[in-house]
Amino acid sequence: MKTLANNILSQNGFTTISNIYTISEVNSLIETIENATQNSPNFRQSNDLFAIRNLLSEIPELQNILWND
């Protein structure tokens, strides 16, 4: 699996790896983002867009979920 991902990365410049986070961790990420105070200009939201610039600076508590074992 690791070799396949490396080959795809070499060929395409990117790859995806499944099952990095558990369903519980994904739900925690979503909940943390949804509960973040969105009064910063780095939060962009419209009918068809939701974006956060400098995500980890704006929501530092995400780091504990993202950088897991």
Image (cartoon, grey):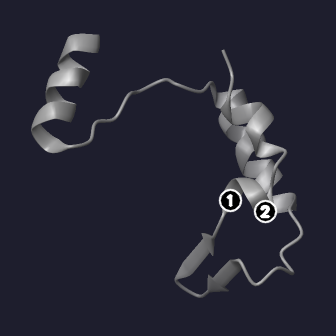
Indicate the quadrant where residue 29 lies. top right
Indicate the quadrant where residue 69 lies. top right
Residue farthest to the left, as pictured: 11
Q: Residue at x 59, y 27 (%)?
A: 21
Q: Nearer the viewer, residue 56 or 17?
A: 56
Residue farthest to the bottom, as pictured: 46
Q: Is residue 1 visible?
A: no
Residue 22 at x, y percent in the picture: 63, 24
- The mark tally for this picture is 2
Indicate the quadrant where residue 53 lies. bottom right
The quarter of the rendered structure image containing the N terminus is top left
Q: Residues within 10 Å of mark 2 (few under 14, many from 20)?
A: some
Secondary structure beneath dot 1 equals: helix
Secondary structure beneath dot 2 equals: helix
Residue 63 at x, y percent in the picture: 75, 39
Q: Tell me the number on the disc at residue 6.
A: none
As measured in the structure, the alpha-carbon distance from the residue carrying label 2 to the one carrying label 1 is: 5 Å
As shown in the figure, which amino acid type bears the numbered disc 2? Answer: Glu
Q: Residue at x 41, y 27 (%)?
A: 18
Q: Is residue 23 visible?
A: yes
Residue 13 at x, y percent in the picture: 21, 43
Residue at numbered disc 1: 55
Up-down relation of residue 68 to residue 16 (above or below): above
Q: Nearer the viewer, residue 35 or 7?
A: 7
Q: Tell me the number on the disc at residue 58.
A: 2
As shown in the figure, which amino acid type bears the numbered disc 1? Answer: Leu
